[in-house]
Amino acid sequence: MEKTRQDAWELVCRYTKSENLRKHMLAVEAAMRAYARRFGEDEELWGIVGLLHDFDYEQHPTLPDHPLKGAEILRAEGWPEEVITAILSHAEGTGVPRTTRLHHALYAVDELTGLITAVALVRPSKDIRDVTLKSIKKKWKDRRFAAGVKREEIEAGARDLGIPLDEHIAFVLQAMQAHAEELGLAGTRSSSAP
């Protein structure tokens, strides 16, 4: 039986209670699907990898338990090795090198989605559609802002993908903006016109 996005979402919901962590995985999924379209790759595969990449993080928040323990669960549930290897490659300390564009993309977008989310949440509107590349770059320079975001990983990920950093940031921002409601980043905009 082939695994589906619905199977992935059910697994995420079974293991992850935090709405913020679920939204992070949805943001990574959105960015991964956008990159799959850009590169002419398998959008379902890339999206599922993005959605599942942190499903075990609540139970195993330290490396290398995350994602090694998650990989054990995925194998037991019959997920393809391609999905498992990609997820293992996104974390340091697993011993799994990033060898494919899928691996590089996951590594490149993971930290960046967190930074973009943080930038959106400090805007007065709390709406990601009001975020610009310029506003992200301004916050990027302030190392105290979203201090847990590993900017050097974002830079390395963009470099390994062969995409200039600013272009990478703008691309992921646009992918997330297209899913503002689902990501809980539609802010305080009124849905009805006066």
Image (spheres, rainbow, N blue to C red):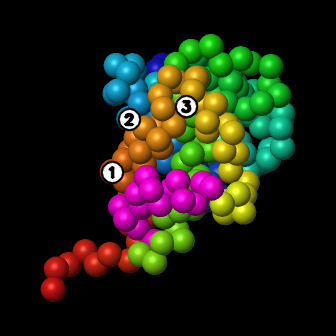
**133 falls in the magenta region:** yes
**Residue that badge 2 annotates:** 34
Quadrant of the image occupied by residue 148: bottom right
Instruction: Choose mark 2 or mark 3, whichever is in front.
Output: 3
Furthest residue in direction bottom, as rendered = 194
Identify the mark nearer the N-term, 2 or 3. Answer: 2
Q: 109 above or below 59?
A: above
Residue 93 visible in the shown view:
yes
User: What is the x, y in percent for residue 1?
Assistant: 48, 19
What secondary structure do most residues of the magenta stretch adopt?
helix
**Residue that badge 1 annotates:** 178
Q: 171 above or below 118?
A: above
**Residue that badge 3 annotates:** 158
User: What is the x, y in percent for residue 131?
Assistant: 41, 61
Identify the mark nearer the N-term, 1 or 2. Answer: 2
The magenta region covers 126-141
User: What is the x, y in percent for residue 11?
Assistant: 59, 41
| Marks 1 and 2 close (CB-CB < 8 Å) | yes
